[in-house]
Image (spheres, grey):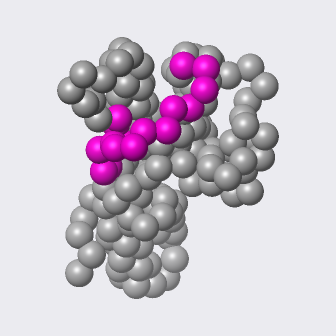
């Protein structure tokens, strides 16, 4: 895949190209679908960056930060996956989860990328009960942000 192919019909969530009866070069459409699935299923990114790495590793993925530049220009917030020597961009959709290898943290997409904040442990203060309650409230909020607990 040297150039991006524009498809007139694709699946709504992952943008997988759809085949038509009697279509020529079906292998290009099937290979595009396989590459998109390879990048999206159990997605693990190397990190978050606004510019592509100088020497990208085949099969690696990145979350494109704002403002994106170079080969990633105009792809802010997308997943950039290195496939067949080119960048393949996946538009995020609600429910998409990724694992960030750099931060060792999961994120999910819900109208924007959400990551659980760092939760501070209680310190040995004089108001331990208040501190413990505050810490538990922060923990619940972090679990809600991570999509582990539902928002009330």
Asked whether the viewer can see residue 126, the reply is yes
Task: Say if the magenta span includes residue 10.
Answer: yes
Identify the residue at image location x=25%, y=65%: 149
Q: For the image shown, how many numbered marks are present on the structure?
A: 0
Identify the residue at image location x=38%, y=16%: 25
Residue 33, located in which quarter of the rendered image?
top left
- Answer above or below: position of 99 versus 33: below
Identify the residue at image location x=63%, y=54%: 76
Residue 93, located in which quarter of the rendered image?
bottom left
Front residue of this view, candidates 121 and 113: 113
Front residue of this view, candidates 38 and 131: 38
> Residue 130's spot in the image, x, y percent?
40, 84
> Residue 38's spot in the image, x, y percent?
38, 25
- On the rendered structure, is 92 left or right of 55? left
- On the rendered structure, is 151 left or right of 43? left
Front residue of this view, candidates 6 and 119: 6
- On the rendered structure, is 87 left or right of 94? right
> Residue 44's spot in the image, x, y percent?
45, 34
Q: Give the range drawn in magenta.
A: 1-17
- Answer above or below: position of 105 versus 139: above
């Amino acid at each position: 895949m040297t150039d991006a192919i524009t498809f007139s019909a694709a699946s709504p969530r992952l943008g997988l190209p759809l085949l038509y009866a009697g279509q020529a070069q079906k292998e290009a459409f099937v290979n595009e679908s396989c590459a998109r699935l390879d990048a999206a299923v159990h997605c693990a990114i190397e990190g978050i960056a606004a510019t592509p790495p100088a020497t990208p590793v085949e099969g690696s993925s990145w979350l494109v930060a704002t403002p994106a530049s170079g080969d990633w220009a105009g792809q802010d917030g997308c997943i950039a996956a290195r496939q067949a020597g080119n960048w393949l961009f996946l538009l995020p959709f609600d429910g998409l989860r990724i694992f960030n290898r750099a931060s060792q943290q999961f994120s999910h997409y819900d109208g924007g990328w959400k990551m659980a904040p760092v939760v501070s442990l209680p310190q040995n203060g004089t108001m331990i009960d208040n501190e413990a309650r505050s810490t538990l409230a922060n923990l619940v909020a972090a679990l809600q942000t991570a999509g582990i607990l539902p928002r009330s």
